[in-house]
Image: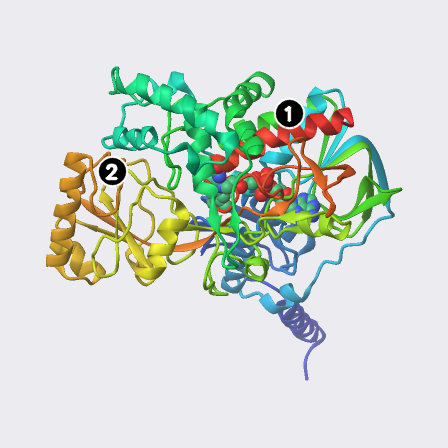
Amino acid sequence: MLTGAKRAATLCIALTLLLTLTVGAFAAYNPGTYVAEVRGHNGPIKVSATFSRDAITSVEVLDHNETVGVGTPAIERLPKAIVEHQSLGLDTVSGATITSYAVLAGVSSCVKQAGGDIDALRAKVIKKTPGPRITKTADVVVIGAGGAGMSAAMSAVENGASVIVIEKNAAIGGNTLVSGCVWNAANPALSSKTPAAMGLNEKLKSYLEMDEGELPPEFRPTLKTLKEQIAAYLAGDTSMMFDSVELHMIQTYFAGKRQGLDGTTIEGSFDFIEILCRKSLETQEWLKKTAGTVFRDELAEPIGSLWKRANGPVDKWEDFFVKPAKYITDNGGEILCEVTGKELIVENGRVVGVKAVMADGTPMELYAAKGVVLATGGYGGNTAMVIEYNNYWPELDPNILTTNRKEIIGEGIIMALAIGADLTGMGYTQLMPIGWADTGLLALGGGSNVMYISQEGRRFVNEYAERDVISKAAFAVGTLFYELKTLGSDFVTPVGTPESHVVFIADTLEELAAKIGCDPAVLKSEVERYNSFVDQGYDPDFGKTSFTHRIESPYVARAMKPSIHHTMGGVKIDTDCHVLNKEGKIIPGLYAAGEVAGGIHAGNRVGGNAIADIFVFGRIAGANAAKGK
Ligand SMILES: Cc1cc2nc3c(=O)[nH]c(=O)nc-3n(C[C@H](O)[C@H](O)[C@H](O)COP(=O)(O)OP(=O)(O)OC[C@H]3O[C@@H](n4cnc5c(N)ncnc54)[C@H](O)[C@@H]3O)c2cc1C
């Protein structure tokens, strides 16, 4: 028999045990802080999560390399949202999908380490409740906040209009923000202090010999002026570069003239090319003056640029987005992110606004008293659309990769088409020859310091040629090829790891040949031959005309494959950026600028001409919309 005191003590122990077991049964986590490393878009992301017995108490991203304005919205928002909702069933942040998945994966790993139930947390889906319809009105509504949209909005507020910009992603930027942001503008002040590469004079002489009959009549005076400029240059000191608006125009015309698979020829119009090339430098000055954009004032030559004439912002996020956004909002404009334009509103034949939807499903109607500017970019993230319209590439693999952000899918073109807009040049898509073989992302680089070799180690193309020429040549030698250069011969740092099989560094050509799997004797003889061309500034094999570096040890070879890059086609516009219908008439109230518009680059865009295009024509579209012109 238990005494009363013993009975009480036993009961107490039993109760404590029961309590411990009960609480233990409900403990969701082993308290503590756990760390995980996951792969983000640009490299590893280090995440930590802290747990009490029954909750995630904090999540932190300790380290990352994600791009500002692209991946960072996910890094800023998701940790808080995970803690707030105690859930891993959250939507990814628009425009930051890969980073979002990475953060969620990192926290999942921490949950697992803490003994939590990942599936239960993922199953807790957070439902968004749409609010009632929101209606807003301004003089001008801009759809899309990449470079063209920002330029249009700046120009519209500068011309006294009230402006609303909508952007479907969580942050402004679009493809422009992930681009190299190099911007072609003939700038004699910069050219005259840039040393001329070996071979360029030969190229200039070829223009002197050019027959004017090769050009449409409206371009002939341009060629005549160019010949006079070149003759004067060649008669003087040629140690520094020559450049002029006329050279830019003639190069843009020839680079764009292409024949489609259907036998038709596409070529750039004089008016568009003249505006693009003549207003480019002036538009850089305008950005400096209005937004305070700072340019590097040092010329670059991205692949396929055909000449060294590209300047660029010192900091693309700050100079192309943060500062312009401040200019827009300081002047009364409004920028709304996570608002997707869905359908243009047409009343009595005039575009008067756009129906849109917010990220939580709330419907919006945005009315524009003076004009709507489409600035939604191209469709390089929409392979099916590229293939549907293709009239240039004999074969396009449906699995071809892209350099584009995946949100760039041609929505503006589809919206305009739905209200009767005409399209032009849709069959012509630019492939970027130097896409990383493993991801398709842009590998960056130019043509003057490199030699391209096939998998057999043989040189196969003029590396300074247009992008389509290089891509076609790459397909002919088996698609995958190597960009070979002297390590350190340009600003591009080799990325990738030995496991990624995309970057190979070697001290000798024998070692490099072993790494890429080609015959060392072939590689050596090809490099020797190429270096002799560099020395003489003349390439009898493929006609390359710009050489800045020999190929010497230490060598770096980067594995490349052409990937979808730029869509030259889009809605048909006139030089005032009015969108035209199928009868060639202006659709009142609708303007377009940037990659959403077709016709500027014809069949092949010159590298560095798109950034010029979006700011030049964005500015024109915004001004005309503001004036209701
Ligand atoms: C990796 C890469 C590098 C490049 N580098 C260069 C370079 O150095 N020089 C050069 O000249 N060209 C370059 N280009 C090409 C150039 O960047 C693009 O042609 C240009 O940035 C397009 O600008 P945009 O304003 O027309 O479109 P984007 O910058 O793509 O902006 C369009 C915006 O509209 C938004 N949007 C789309 N649909 C909707 C909708 N329905 N509602 C609301 N918003 C919407 C998108 O989210 C996006 O933010 C590069 C392209 C890529 C992909």
Residue pointed to by mark 2: 488
- Name the quarter showing ligand 1: top right
**Is 350 placed left or right of 439 in the picture?**
right
Q: Amino acid at mark 1?
A: Lys
Q: How is the image coloured?
A: rainbow
Q: Residue at x 25, y 16 (%)?
A: 237
Residue count near mark 2 (Cα–Cα under 10 Å), binned few <14, some 14–19, many ≥20: few
Q: How many marks?
A: 2
Residue 362 bears which disc, if any? Answer: none
Query: In what element is the residue under mark 2?
Result: loop
- In this rendered view, identify the residue nearer to me: 45 or 619: 619
Q: Position of residue 185 (x, y in %)?
A: 46, 26
Mark 1 and mark 2: span between their CA atoms?
37 Å
Query: Which is more toward the observer, 44 or 365?
Result: 365
Task: Specify the amino acid type for callout 2.
Answer: Gly
First-in-chain label (1 vs 2): 1
**The N terminus: image quadrant:** bottom right
Answer with the quarter of the image where residue 530 lies.
top left
Nearer-the-camera pick, 2 or 211: 211
Picture quarter with the C terminus:
top right
Going by the image, does 125 lie left or right of 518? right
Q: Position of residue 126 (x, y in %)?
A: 72, 58
As drawn, is 358 to the left or to the right of 55?
A: right
Q: Which image quarter: residue 231?
A: top left
Q: Which residue is mark 1?
A: 326
